[in-house]
Every structure is written in C-alpha cells, then in structure tokens.
Amino acid sequence: MLKYTLHKLLVAALVAITVSFVAFMLLRVSGDLATALGGESARGEDIARLRAQLGLDRPILSQYWDWATRALVGDFGRSFYYPEPVWTLLRERLPVTLTLACWGLVISLAIGIPLGVLAALRPNTLIDRVAMTLAVLGQALPTFWLGLLLIILFGLVLRWLPMSGTDTWQHFILPSFVLGYYSTPAVMRLTRSGMLEVLATDYIRTAYSKGLPHRTVLFKHALRNAVIPVVALASVQFGLMLSGSVVIETVFAMQGIGQLAWESISRQDFPVVQAVLLLVSMFYVWLTFASDLINAWLDPRIRAG
C-alpha cells in the first residue's frame, strides 16, 4: 500500500504543478493584462509603467516561479478591486462553498446509491423505471430553474425555508438539494450498473450457495465492490460542485467563491480569478488522489496491479 500511495502522490504532485502552470498561463494568453487594467484611455507610457509595476515585463517563467512560490504559502497578491489580499477574500468565501458542496454531495450519495441498488435488485420493474425517470429529470432540469422553482414553492408560497443568504443552516437546505439532485443521476446509474455486474458474478452465486444471508451478500460483498467506481465519481462530482456552484450561489445570493469568481471576472480582478482557478484545480487533483487511495483500500487488486 505504501508503494502505491507514493506512486499516486508523485503523479498528483506532477499534475498539480502542470495545472498551476496552466492556470497561470490562461490569463496571460487572454491578452495584455496591463492594457486591460489601464483601460481604453490609458497612454502607452502609462501601460508600460503599469506593466513594470506588475512585473509583466519579466520572462514568463520568472513570473510563474514568483507567483507559484508565493501561492504555496497562501500569498496570491492583492485584489485589484477589493482593498485587501486575495487570500483574505478566499478565506471569507470558501467556507460557504465548501459547506454547500459537502451537503450537495451527501444528498447526491444518499439519494443516488439507494436508488441504484433498488433499481439493480428489481431491473425492468416499476422501481427501476421510477429511478431512471428521476435520473433523466435530474439531468434535464436546469439548476437555476429548479432553484427558482423551489424558492417560489418553499420560500414564497409555503414560507418554510429562507430564500437567500447564509446566516443559518436552513439557508443551505434548498441550494444543497439543487446542487445534489443535479449530481444524483450519475451516482444512481453507476451504482445500478455496478450492482448488476457484481450480482452476476460467480463469487456472489457462491456466497448464496453457502447459505449466507441475503443482507450479508448484498452489503458486505456486492455493494462494497459495486461502489468502487462511485468513490471515484464522488470525488469528481465534489470538484464539479465547487466549480459549478457559481449558478447556485447567484440564484440563492450566497457569498461563496463561485460568486466571487463571477464578480472578479466581470471586474477584471485577475489575481482573484487566478487564485480561484488554482484553488478549485487543486481540489480536483487531491480529491482524485484521495479517491485512488480509498479505492485501493476497498479493492486490494487495484494496489496490487
């Protein structure tokens, strides 16, 4: 297991370095930052002075090295729009997005895995059709439309839940459900297909022939192997929730990093955009690393290979 962990850690570190360089370069290839910051009325000498102040006149690799070494210790520079460091903005907004993504993932797994298991145990029945219908609706309904629908129903009509903000845990119920329901179909379908494949294997038939209880065979043998690909999917879905929360945060007026990214793009606040992009990318990399370790723990054949 140690050898497998070190190998995956090396791969994750190389991917992280590559991703950080891509995140750094994306804003450089989009145009001249000094010209964008100077505005249309800026003169040539003003743009040259601004380029020198920001260090944009130095070689790209030198700029990247300075930025990456400062980013390692949490120094992403200062915001062009807000009068404070970028890390302060991220530290204030990140808990909102993490809470929203965590609850969204919990809801997605809590709905998707049981539905997938039930659909696999009763294929081509009413339960299977209902589960597939819910999966189709989950991917067909736009998140902003579902969010607005829930706001009207539970916020305006029934007045059961708050419609916006992040003051209490009740404020996270509606946006977490919207975010989680959108990811539920992928979890459900993968669980269903995994269970169907595992239930048809020889070792499951052998377990039944030995007289093991149905619940033991189902949960200890079948489900444990069927959810291995779901673990990898969950890590990807969590990253998608972090990066895709901008729509949910906008609909429910939640001040998270998704909303911060949208505001920074519209205001050309490049240090903040770069930091958000790097932060979300790092989450993707290390979540994938964590899912590889969990899968290796669940299935020894993975680390042996």
Image (cartoon, rainbow, N blue to C red):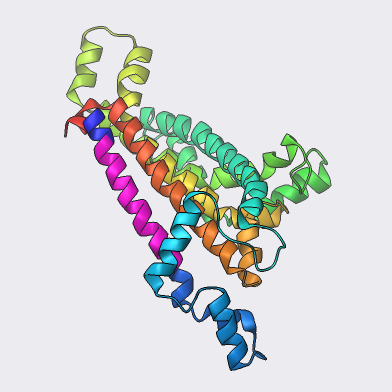
Determine whether 269 is above or below 178 in the image: below
Q: Quadrant of the C terminus?
A: top left
Determine whether 88 is above or below 203 in the image: below
Q: Nearer the viewer, residue 174 or 203?
A: 174
Q: Position of residue 152 (x, y in %)?
A: 77, 50
As drawn, is 233 to the left or to the right of 243?
A: left
Spot the residue most to the top: 211
Q: Position of residue 225 (x, y in %)?
A: 30, 28
Residue at the spot x=17%, y=23% of the render? 202
Residue 224, quarter of the rendered image: top left
As drawn, is 213 to the left or to the right of 81?
A: left
Q: Position of residue 66 (x, y in %)?
A: 45, 62
Q: Nearer the viewer, residue 163 or 146?
A: 163
Residue at the spot x=55%, y=58% of the render? 76
Q: Position of residue 34 (x, y in %)?
A: 56, 80
Q: Is residue 252 visible?
A: yes
Q: Nearer the viewer, residue 229 or 10?
A: 10
Q: Is residue 133 visible?
A: no
- Write the start and end of the magenta stretch as one range: 6-24
As drawn, is 9 to the left or to the right of 64?
A: left
Residue at the spot x=63%, y=66% of the render? 264
Whether 10 is among the magenta residues is yes
